[in-house]
């Protein structure tokens, strides 16, 4: 009756655990299959143990069959439990080395249990129990040897349960009538179940991927394994999506989820079973099994190829730029922290230099330190009061005066200014560009109102809006709010969009441009000649002005070879002609010499912006320069 009670208890415990296992969708995690298998084995053993006490199966031949089957299932269940302990304590490579301590006792257990059932020998049965005990002691041994590879709480609880199971196995070995072993094993499996953690903690609900805690735990085991196997190399492929913190939170919940699912689906497809860990927003690590160099190369190549194409669809179809790197362990990183530092260093380098692939061996650690310092300053720029808006006047060749200006943001750094081409990409990546651009919007609208720019002969001020700005659904409302606060007209704001941003977010950019255009805002296509926009894009969007980048204006006068200068001049002339043909006006940027100015006059360029007339300057100086020039 006591055995019946213990088997019923074990049955109920295991049934509840299996139900929870499937309810929490833990069966979808391949690594959890060992625990599930041990549950099923011991559940079946307990079930048969209960059935064997019924009158229908009380005959000797049934008792013998049940005894053999129960002992086989119990032995398999214990073996699987020990394998699980090994799996969570040690990197899974090298598992076969320990399997001898599991397989041989398991086989011995089964053989002697069968022999005991056939002969009725209690001694043989006890040898079978000794096999169980040996496997349980192996589990205790693993927990003690590799205790530093797991949390103290996990190790202690598993150790206690293994000791309890071992004691109850000894009790049953000495007194077979007390069948308490399966109950102890059910408790041990319950502890293993809770060691797996809640799957919502293990696999992130947002992405369905393993998170940073799991990455740390997994790599901790791998580095421990590498310490013991000096001749082995492991590989990690890291992917960093540029600006993930920014645009993922700007698309709205529904569209953000759709885009994220699209990206994750592609990552899972490319991984093809290789574990993926999300280190942070937009940063992922693909961890190869032992060696795995060829698989690492395949994954990196596939990622690079996929990120050449667009993600999403309709208004939210967009290019997503990313950087990948392949890290060989332990050669390139000999600890978890060193690995993490290397991944983020490669991510920053790729973002700063717009590189799709980073060779981590060539990373400049001193430069990375500087970038991290800038990142911190950029995040606190607005609250620290380190931002200032500068203005560069734009000269009209026809009216021979300044008629507008471009607002340019500057970031103070104690010792001077941080170059815009350094801090702006960082701001776009860490999300602070939104706050910075709002600061510019507010300052420009205030200046237009306070200085009454129309009385100075200025028609509008140009502001640069970044990609994250242009994909905000509430952008028109935000701009109109500032216009209303400062009582200015939308036409006094000219919005500059870079050619590359128009390419990156086709649908959403076009939609916002049209909304703002209807409200009275004007638009300029900036940096023409640096991107890859099709002519149809330029024709379709309402650009009043197209700016020719300095890379078009300056080469005809700076290149050394005659042939190169001639080709550059042809490109400049063709660009100016095309802009006029599509009905837009031209602003030539980067004009620094009289020779350049005269050529642009020949090409009928309407406006000139460059050091030849004026450099970017603070607001008060800008007002004085405009007053002096426009009074003549």
Image: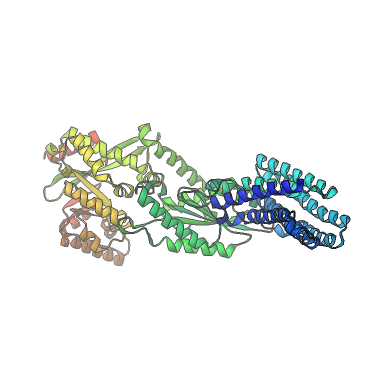
The quarter of the picture where the C terminus appears is top left
Q: Nearer the viewer, residue 48 or 36?
A: 48
The image quadrant of residue 113 is bottom right
Which residue is drawn at the image coordinates 40% and 39% (left, top)?
378
The image quadrant of residue 493 is top left
Q: In the picture provided, is 378 more to the left or to the right than 172?
A: left
Residue 413 in the image, given as x and y percentages of width and height: 39, 36
Which residue is drawn at the image coordinates 38% and 46% (left, top)?
249
Q: Nearer the viewer, residue 3 or 124?
A: 3
Q: Nearer the viewer, residue 374 or 158?
A: 158
Q: In the picture provided, is 83 more to the left or to the right than 281?
A: right
- How many discs appear? 0
Residue 199 in the image, given as x and y percentages of width and height: 55, 48
Residue 416 in the image, given as x and y percentages of width and height: 38, 37
Which residue is drawn at the image coordinates 72% and 43% (left, top)?
161
Note whether residue 623 is visible: no
Residue 117 in the image, given as x and y percentages of width and height: 83, 60
């Amino acid at each position: 009756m006591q055995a019946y009670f213990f088997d019923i208890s074990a049955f109920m415990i295991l049934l509840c655990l299996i139900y929870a296992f499937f309810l929490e969708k833990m069966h979808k995690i391949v690594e959890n299959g060992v625990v599930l298998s041990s549950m099923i084995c011991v559940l079946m053993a307990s079930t048969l143990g209960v059935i064997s006490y019924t009158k229908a199966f009380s005959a000797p031949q049934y008792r013998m069959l049940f005894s053999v089957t129960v002992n086989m299932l119990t032995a398999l269940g214990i073996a699987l439990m020990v394998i699980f302990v090994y799996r969570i304590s040690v990197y899974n490579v090298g598992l076969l080395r320990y399997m001898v301590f599991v397989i041989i006792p398991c086989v011995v257990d089964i053989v002697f249990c069968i022999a005991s059932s056939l002969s009725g020998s209690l001694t043989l049965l006890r040898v079978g129990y000794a096999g169980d005990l040996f496997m349980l002691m192996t589990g205790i041994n693993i927990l003690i040897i590799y205790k530093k590879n797991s949390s103290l709480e996990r190790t202690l609880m598993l150790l206690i349960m293994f000791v309890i199971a071992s004691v109850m196995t000894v009790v049953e070995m000495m007194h077979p009538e007390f069948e308490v072993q399966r109950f102890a094993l059910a408790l041990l499996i319950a502890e293993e179940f809770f060691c797996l953690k809640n799957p919502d903690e293990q696999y992130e609900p947002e992405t369905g991927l393993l998170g940073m805690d799991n990455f740390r735990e997994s790599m901790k085991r791998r580095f421990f394994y590498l310490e013991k196997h000096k001749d082995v190399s492991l590989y990690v492929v890291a992917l960093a999506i540029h600006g993930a913190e920014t645009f993922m939170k700007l698309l709205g919940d529904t569209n953000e989820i759709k885009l994220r699912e699209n990206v994750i689906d592609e990552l899972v497809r490319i991984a093809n079973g290789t574990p993926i860990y999300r280190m942070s927003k937009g940063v992922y690590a693909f961890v190869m099994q032992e060696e795995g160099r060829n698989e690492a190369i395949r994954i990196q190549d596939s990622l690079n190829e996929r990120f050449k194409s667009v993600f999403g669809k309709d208004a939210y179809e967009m290019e997503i730029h990313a950087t990948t790197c392949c890290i060989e362990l332990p050669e390139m990183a000999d600890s978890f922290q060193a690995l993490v530092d290397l991944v983020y260093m490669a991510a920053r380098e790729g973002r700063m230099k717009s590189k799709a692939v980073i060779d981590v061996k060539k990373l400049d650690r001193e430069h990375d330190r500087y970038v991290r310092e800038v990142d911190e300053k950029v995040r606190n720029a607005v609250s620290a009061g380190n931002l200032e808006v500068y203005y560069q006047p734009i000269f009209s060749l026809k009216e021979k005066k300044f008629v507008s200006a471009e607002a340019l943001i500057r970031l103070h750094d104690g010792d001077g200014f941080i170059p815009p081409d350094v801090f702006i990409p960082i701001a776009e990546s860490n999300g602070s560009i939104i706050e910075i651009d709002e600061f510019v919007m507010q300052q420009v609208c205030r200046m237009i109102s306070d200085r009454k720019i129309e009385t100075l002969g200025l028609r509008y001020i140009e502001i640069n809006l970044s990609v994250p700005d242009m994909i905000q659904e509430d952008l028109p409302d935000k701009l109109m709010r500032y216009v209303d606060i400062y009582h200015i007209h939308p036409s006094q704001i000219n919005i500059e969009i870079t050619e590359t941003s128009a390419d990156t977010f086709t649908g959403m950019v076009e939609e916002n441009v049209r909304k703002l255009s209807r409200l009275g805002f004007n638009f300029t296509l900036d940096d023409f000649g640096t991107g890859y926009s099709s002519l149809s894009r330029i024709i379709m969007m309402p650009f009043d002005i197209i700016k020719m980048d300095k890379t078009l204006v300056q080469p005809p006068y700076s290149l050394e070879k005659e042939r190169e200068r001639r080709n550059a001049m042809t490109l400049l002339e063709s660009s100016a002609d095309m802009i006029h043909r599509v009905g837009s006006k031209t602003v030539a940027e980067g004009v620094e010499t009289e020779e350049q100015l005269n050529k642009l006059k020949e090409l009928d360029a309407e406006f000139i912006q460059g050091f030849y007339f004026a450099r970017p300057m603070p607001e008060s100086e800008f007002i004085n320069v405009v007053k002096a020039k426009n009074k003549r």
